[in-house]
């Protein structure tokens, strides 16, 4: 029987990606000067955004969902790889909370803002946001790959092993495309596809967490 705690944690994990996606969709439509195709998601929470509270809320709810999933997996999959994967999700969740509160000064994908970053005239919280974001992205690449190992020896998670491997590899490939700016003026769309892959994975794992019945002991 599924515990009430795991069911709650799973539902929070499912809510996080939904809330985050809804936030950038709504905030992007509400900001008449914003380009979904060119600008990154963080710009919707920047100091010069028209409705930053929408995106900040999305960041915080996604952070809550990621932390909830980390807690649920840690108590459900009793292996070292499970604990390490849960820790990576916890770090990603904490990073998302920091990224939501440490706001960019401006939209980094726009030339004027990029020039400010290059000249070193942006604020400390702009730099903190960007550096934390990179750590979040790396954690979201590593977490599915590490947890895939744990899922291999956990009966109720085994069918998600290959999905987790594919998620980690695709996330890494899309991260490279996004960071290198291959998309050019379409880099905003590249980022949205990139982040949607691991966030969908978080939601899928959250759904599974609402159905598992207890801890599964496994070796590394």
Image (cartoon, rainbow, N blue to C red):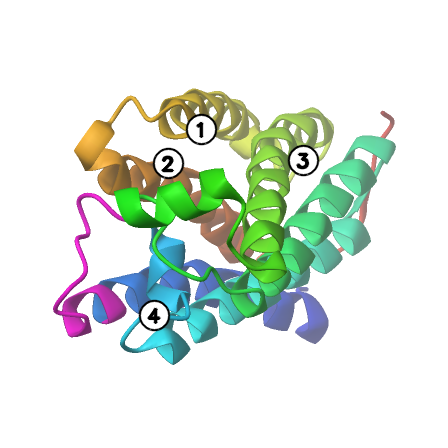
Which residue is tagged 1? 175
Which residue is tagged 4? 48
Which residue is tagged 2? 194
Circles 2 and 4: CB atoms closer than 8 Å: no
Task: Kindly report which numbered mark, 3 or 4, lies closer to the viewer in this rendering.
Answer: 4
Position of 206 with respect to 181 (left or right) is: right
Q: Is residue 86 magenta?
A: no
The residue shown at (64%, 30%) is 142
On screen, 33 above or below 111?
below
Q: Secondary structure at mark 2?
A: helix
Give the image quarter of residue 7. bottom right
Position of 148 with respect to 204 (left or right) is: right
Q: Which mark is on residue 155?
A: 3
Mark toward the start of the polypeptide (2 vs 4): 4
Q: Secondary structure at mark 4?
A: loop
Residue 209, percent across and down? 60, 56
Task: Kindly report which numbered mark, 2 or 4, lies closer to the viewer in this rendering.
Answer: 4
Mark toward the start of the polypeptide (1 vs 2): 1
* Magenta stretch, residue numbers: 27-39
On screen, 31 above or below 73?
below
On screen, 215 above or below 62?
above
Q: CA distance from mark 3 to mark 2?
A: 29 Å
Mark toward the start of the polypeptide (3 vs 2): 3
């Amino acid at each position: 029987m599924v515990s009430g705690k795991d069911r709650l944690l799973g539902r929070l994990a499912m809510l996080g990606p939904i809330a985050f996606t809804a936030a950038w969709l709504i905030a992007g439509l509400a900001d008449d000067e914003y380009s979904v195709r060119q600008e990154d998601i963080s710009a919707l929470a920047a100091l010069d955004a028209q409705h930053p509270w929408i995106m900040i809320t999305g960041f915080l709810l996604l952070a809550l969902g990621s932390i909830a999933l980390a807690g649920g997996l840690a108590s459900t999959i009793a292996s070292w790889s499970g604990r390490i994967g849960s820790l990576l999700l916890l770090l990603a969740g904490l990073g998302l909370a920091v990224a939501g509160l440490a706001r960019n000064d401006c939209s980094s994908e726009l030339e004027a803002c990029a020039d400010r970053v290059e000249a070193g005239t942006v604020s400390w919280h702009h730099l903190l946001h960007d550096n934390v974001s990179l750590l979040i992205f790396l954690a979201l690449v590593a977490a599915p790959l590490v947890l895939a190992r744990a899922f291999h020896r956990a009966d109720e998670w085994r069918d998600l092993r290959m999905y987790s491997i594919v998620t980690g590899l695709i996330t890494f490939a899309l991260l490279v495309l996004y960071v290198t700016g291959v998309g050019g003026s379409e880099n905003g769309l590249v980022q949205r596809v990139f982040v949607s892959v691991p966030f969908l994975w978080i939601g899928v794992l959250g759904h599974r967490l609402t159905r598992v019945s207890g801890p599964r002991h496994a070796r590394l």
